[in-house]
Image (cartoon, grey):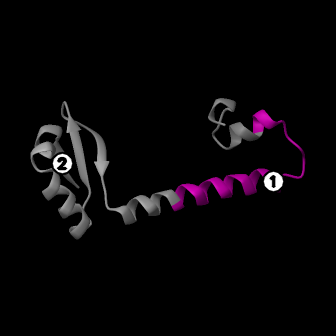
Amino acid sequence: MIEKTISKLREELAETLESVYHTKTRVGVKRRNKIMCVVMPLEDARFLERLEEAYDIEKVRQVLANPDPIPFEDALKECGLTADDL
């Protein structure tokens, strides 16, 4: 992964986006020497979304496979959620 500071990204935004699009390379955006976000190809973002959905579906299946009813709060906890996430 290529790394660029925010100021460098500002200077080279169009070129960076073109490069990400054509070379499928991710760019880590740094602030104060720490990567704070990543610019990635759309295909990568879509893949990550599908992966998250598959993970969520598997967690729901695991909860539903349990023959004993469990409290709603416990089901949320098993899925790594809280009521505030809903």
Secondary structure under tag 1 reads helix
Which numbered marker is on residue 39?
none
Mark 2: amino acid:
Glu
Q: Which residue is mark 2?
A: 3
* Mark toward the start of the polypeptide (2 vs 1): 2
Say which amino acid is labelled 1. Leu
Name the residue carrying label 1.
64
Residue located at (18% from left, 48% from top): 3
At 31% across and 43% down in the image, what residue appears? 37
Percent position of residue 12, x then y: 11, 50
Callout count: 2
Q: Is 6 rendered above or below residue 20? A: above
Dot 2: within a 10 Å radius of its alpha carbon, few (fewer than 14), some, or many (20 or more) residues? some
Magenta range:
50-74
Q: Residue at x 30, y 48 (%)?
A: 38
Give the crowd class for mark 1: few <14, some 14-19, many >=20 residues within 10 Å: few
Q: Residue 57 in the image: state x and y as whole percent.
A: 67, 57
Q: Position of residue 84 (x, y in %)?
A: 64, 30
* Label 2 element class: strand
- Relative to the observer, which residue lies in front, 86 or 30? 86
Furthest residue toward right: 68
Q: Are marks 2 and 1 in contact (CB under 8 Å)?
A: no
Q: Magenta stretch containing residue 66, yes or no?
A: yes
**Residue 44 is a magenta residue:** no
Asked where in the image residue 54 lies, by quadrant, the reply is bottom right
